[in-house]
């Protein structure tokens, strides 16, 4: 992400979550009444231009993946809360709206992101007259330069209680060193803590047409100043997570079966590039 500027990819993700509320058939995979409201008048025209045409299947597929990963994170969080987890940390929160829809009164939410992105989000919330949840704390951090543990501690995070971490839309933009540093920080949490993340498989692991879709998306995010850097195959990411247990690593077929079966529209995930993973301590 460019220095002192909000994330452009965070905006693209937020636009697609909002488009899901407006353009896809019910029932929604991610029912998020705040997704449109947070964008307000500032991005209303961009939201109207968000691709929805059925002749752009990879664009629809990307929207499907983005809403599925948020739904998967929130479903897995609910499981963690049922086992007495009381802290939820969103790493690279962007314009995530969970804290504004939080159904768990006992759950304290920490949003971790670059200071510029957090300031941008707060300006959007103010402009849209959306109230700040009492149990939400912003924890500014630059993953490449600052210690996650130190920044969370400064924000009032309690490292002695089990915590659930969501790390969505971040891993492909990191260096391997930054990935390992953050994983080590999460792995230092108490037993009962967990993490959910998404990651992309390397270009070399994809069939020809998916390589073309990968190249197109990679070119767009590079142009936005946020290039892809880090990819894993399932065995390689599992080798990075040996401190964790009960790994669940699911691809498009499992995600489609779980969230997109029997739909009346064409919303589903195509290809095999993106994967969702959860793991526990």
Image: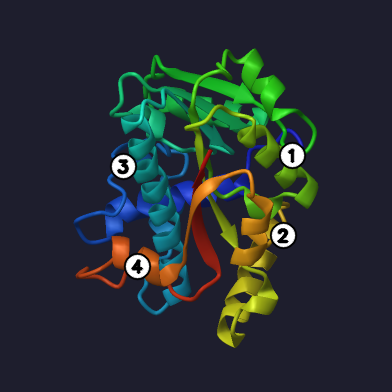
Give the foreground label among 4 and 3: 4
Lower position in the chain sequence, tag 3 or tag 2:
3
Task: Give the residue at x 61% y 79%.
Answer: 206
The N terminus: image quadrant:
top right
Residue 221, percent from left and from top? 66, 58
Q: Quickly name the residue at label 3.
A: 32
Callouts 3 and 1 close, C-beta under 8 Å:
no
Classify mark 3: helix, strand or loop.
Answer: loop
Question: Which disc is residue 256 wearing?
Answer: 4
Locate residue 213: give its quadrant.
Answer: bottom right
Badge 2 vs badge 4, beta-carbon distance below 8 Å: no
Distance between the Cα atoms at labels 2 and 4? 28 Å
Query: Residue 230 location, x and y as percent?
Result: 71, 58
Residue at the (62%, 47%) spot, across then down: 170
Q: Comparing marks 1 and 4, which lies closer to the viewer?
A: 1
**Secondary structure beneath label 1:** helix
Badge 2 local density, few (<14 within 10 Å), some, or many (20+)?
few
CA distance for labels 4 and 3: 20 Å
Residue, disc 1: 181
């Amino acid at each position: 992400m460019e220095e002192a500027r909000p994330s452009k990819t965070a905006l693209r993700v937020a636009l697609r979550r909002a488009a899901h509320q407006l353009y896809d058939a019910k029932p929604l995979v991610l029912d998020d009444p705040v997704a449109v409201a947070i964008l307000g008048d500032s991005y209303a025209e961009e939201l109207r231009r968000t691709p929805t045409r059925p002749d752009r299947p990879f664009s629809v597929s990307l929207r499907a993946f983005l809403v599925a990963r948020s739904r998967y994170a929130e479903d897995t969080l609910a499981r963690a809360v049922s086992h007495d987890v009381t802290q939820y940390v969103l790493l690279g929160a962007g314009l995530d709206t969970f804290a504004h829809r939080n159904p768990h009164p006992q759950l304290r939410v920490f949003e971790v992101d670059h200071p510029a992105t957090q300031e941008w989000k707060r300006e959007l919330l103010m402009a849209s007259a959306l109230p700040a949840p009492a149990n939400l704390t912003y924890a500014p951090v630059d993953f490449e330069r600052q210690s996650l543990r130190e920044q969370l501690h400064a924000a009032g995070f309690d490292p002695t209680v089990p915590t659930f971490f969501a790390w969505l839309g971040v891993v492909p933009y990191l260096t391997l060193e930054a990935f390992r540093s953050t994983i080590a920080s999460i792995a230092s949490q108490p037993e009962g803590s967990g993490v959910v993340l998404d990651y992309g498989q390397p270009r070399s692991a994809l069939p020809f047409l998916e390589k073309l879709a990968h190249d197109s998306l990679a070119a767009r995010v590079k142009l936005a100043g946020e290039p892809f850097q880090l990819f894993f195959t399932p065995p390689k990411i599992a080798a990075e997570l040996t401190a964790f247990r009960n790994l669940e690593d699911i691809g498009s077929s499992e995600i489609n079966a779980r969230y997109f079966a029997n739909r009346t529209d064409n919303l589903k995930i195509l290809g095999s590039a993106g994967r969702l993973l959860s793991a526990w301590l």
